[in-house]
Each structure stands twice: as structure tokens, then as C-alpha cells.
Amino acid sequence: MFDFDRLRSGLLPLVLAPLMISAATLGSAAQGTGDSAEPSAGAAAPAAAAPGQKKLETVRIGYLRTYERTLALSVLDIPPEDIGLAGANVAIKDNDTTGSFMGQKFLLDVVTLKPGEDVGPAVEKMLADGDHYIVTDLSAADTLKAADLAKAKNAIILNAGAEDDRLRNDDCRYNMFHTAPSRSMLTDGLAQYLMWKQWRNWALVEGEHENDKLFAEALKRSATKFGGKIVAEKVFEDAGGARATDSGQAQVQRQIPVFLQDLPDHDVLLVADESEVFGTYIPWRNWIPRPVAGTAGLVPGSWHPASEQWGGAQIQNRFEDASGRRMESKDMQAWTAVRIIGEAASRTQSTDPEKIDAFIRGDDFTVAAFKGQRLTFRDWDWQLRQPVLLGTEDSVVTSSPQEGFLHQVSELDTLGYDRPESTCKFDN
């Protein structure tokens, strides 16, 4: 009897080889065509090479994060357990799809810590295991510690979580790149839209925790930068207590308007509440009927679960198939960080860290991320230039930079700290 299984296993690779070469050629040609050139999903490259194929070379990527399930004012806002990590996993598959044609395979080495745990041992183990690239979703202090430890091995940190502006200014590092937007980029994107709408007078309500204050400071900086006016400020004190009780809605409905009633007339009420203490309570409960923006209402981010423009439906579908949910900003930031390494390995046709590092730092590096244009790094602070999406819980309202906000180099540099404003000084 004829052995069809043996025939398939012996001849199929030979039959498919020209098709694979053709696909690889088309993929390379597509690199300059924009977001539609994103890699399509596929199975990860096999661990062992088939007869006649080059042995796969592995690129190890660390993924270090902190996660602990925390409460939010709305249960819909509790970060999923795989937040960020899900995006990195999809990116690994995308890297493997392209890398399989070039003899490259990508391995993700994941470590999850609880907030407050020392990141030092995890970083040192990743470096010892050969993780030259470490994607992080950590606090600003832990991100900085990871970068300083990685410097000893000439390794690179890709910050996919911390939005603190200080990491792009006085605390910048030559080996620390940022796919997470800074707070100033987010607030500049919001401010541009409010100015485009000619809503120039803003009241500001901020929380009393450190990150709330940082977001509020970024909002005030954006107001000064673009000509908005903060007509009044209030601080909402965190009194603690249960966030969900039988009488909670009735209390909020009475208390929030009273808290806001002494604000002068304003066009928009800005909220700075990264700590999830009061922000969700503000829309539809303010004393003066005005739109709400900031960390509640109209919220700026690097991505939005409803975004499907510029080929975004592709990544949303792949992501949903892999994780069972829509893509959040941190997922996109982690996806982009891992794809940056895959893109550089593909473009250099190498897994040599020195070649990949040089290409990422070079003028020719770009990465597509379903945002309407190729993204590049700012060479003065290694922040990834990217649009800011402004959205409600259900939809994307707009994308900044807004029309009319011009720049001599890139309109994306109207978001965040431009070169003349930056205080970053790299110590190579």
C-alpha cells in the first residue's frame, strides 16, 4: 500500500519552499507600505529546522511586570490578569511568523512580581539567562532600577508601563527606551483637542495621591503650552471606606455636586485620579453641566479597545482570538516593545544584539503599530513618537496631534517634551 503520510512528510517541504520564499519576499517588500504591512498571525516557528533549512537562532526577550488584582470604582475597570502580557505574547507569535523565514525564533521569559517586591533578583536572573532585551511594566522607580542593572551587561530595557516624565528627562538612561507614552504626551494630546474645540477654560479636580498629582501637573503644563486656562483647582481627599455599598450611589449623587458647586464657570471639567478614588463618579454628577476629561470621561491613551482604523481590526482580531478580550493600551505598548525587537532583527537579518541595538538607535528605524504612520524613537530621550487616541468607554473620539498643530520635524513632537524642552542627558 502506498504510504501517503510518508510522501507528505518528505515532499511537502520541497513543494512549499518556493511559496515560502515568495511570501518572505512579499513581506520584505511590504515593509515600506504603512500599517497594512503588519505581520499576520501564524503558528510559531518550529524549534528544530526541517531538512535543508538553516537552524533557528533564538532571540530571548524578558518580560518583567508587577501585578496584583486591585479594586476600581467600576468592576469594568479592573485590569485583567494578563494585562500587557497578552500583547507581548501576540507579538512573539508575530515575530516568529516573520522570523521563521530568516532562521529566527523569539522566546519570551516572563516574571510577574507583586507590587513592592524587589525587582533586582529577577532582572539579574534574566540577564544571566541571556535576556538582552527586557520589556518592563513596572513603577518608575523599579523601571529605573532595572535599567541601571541592565547597563552593566549593555542590555536594553523597553519601558511599556511607566508614564512618568522624569524617566524621559532627568532620570533618562541610554539603555532605556519607552513604548509607553509619557503623561505629558497624553495631556498634550487632550489639550490640543480641547483647544481645537475652542473649549479654553478648564476647572481641575485632582486626587491627593502621588500619581494623581503628577497627572495634574502634566495637565497644567499642557494648559500653559497650548493656551488653555485653569480657572480653578480642587483636591478630592481619599477618605477610604468601601467603594461599593448598597447606599453608595445615593451618597455619590448627593455629595459630588455639592463638592463641585463652588467652581466658577468653565468649559470642561478636568479630572486627575489615576488612583481610582473618585474620577468615575464625576461624569453626569457635576454641578454645572459640562464635559469631563482626563482620567475620566474623555480619556487619552496609546490605544483603545474600539480602535479599528489603519488596519487596527487585524490586531484586534488576532488579539481577541488569543486572549478572549479587546486590546488595552498596556497590551499595545507591550506588543509594540516586542515587535520593535522583531522588526530590528528582520531588517538587519541578524540576531546579533550589537547589530539590533545599533539599528534601533539609528535613523532608519521605524515600526508600524496600526496608528496611521510609522513610529520612530526620539534620539534625545528614546521616547517612541506616537499618536494619542482620545476615547470614551465605548469609542474613539479623535486622535492627536490635531490639525493645525505644526512642527518643523514631526507633528508627533508636539506631544510631550520636545528637544529644546528636554532635560535628558545620556551618560553612555
Image (cartoon, helix red, strand yellow):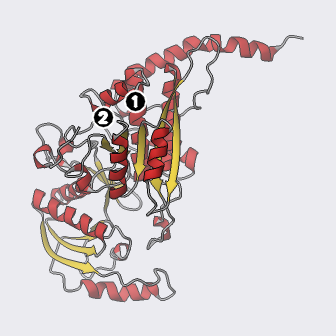
From this view, report whether residue 33 is shown above or below residue 291. Answer: above
Q: Quadrant of the N terminus?
A: top right
Nearer to the camera, 47 or 418: 47
Q: Is residue 148 left or right of residue 12?
A: left
- Type of amino acid at the residue the image marks with label 1: Glu
| 246 is higher (above) or lower (below) than 180 | below
**Residue 84 in view here:** no
Q: Which residue is mark 2?
A: 374
Q: Residue 8 vs residue 102: left or right?
A: right
Calculate the distance from the C-alpha at mark 2 to the C-alpha at mark 1: 12 Å
Q: What label does residue 142 carry, if any? A: none
Answer with left or right where residue 25 lies relative to residue 218.
Answer: right
The quadrant in which residue 367 appears is: top left
Identified at 61% across, 19% down, the residue is: 49
Q: Nearer the viewer, residue 214 or 78?
A: 214
Name which residue lies at 27% across and 26% down: 364
Q: Secondary structure at mark 2?
A: loop
Q: Residues within 10 Å of mark 2 (few under 14, many from 20)?
A: some
**Residue 193 percent location from the top left of the image:** 21, 56
The vertical placement of 356 against 164, above or below, is: above
Residue 403: x and y in percent read 18, 47
Residue to which mark 1 is pinned: 343
Is 197 located above or below residue 240 in the figure?
above
Q: Is residue 259 visible?
A: yes
Q: Amino acid at mark 2?
A: Arg
- In this rendering, which labeled residue sits more in front, label 2 or label 1? 1
**Image coordinates for residue 71, horizontal then vertical, percent:** 48, 71
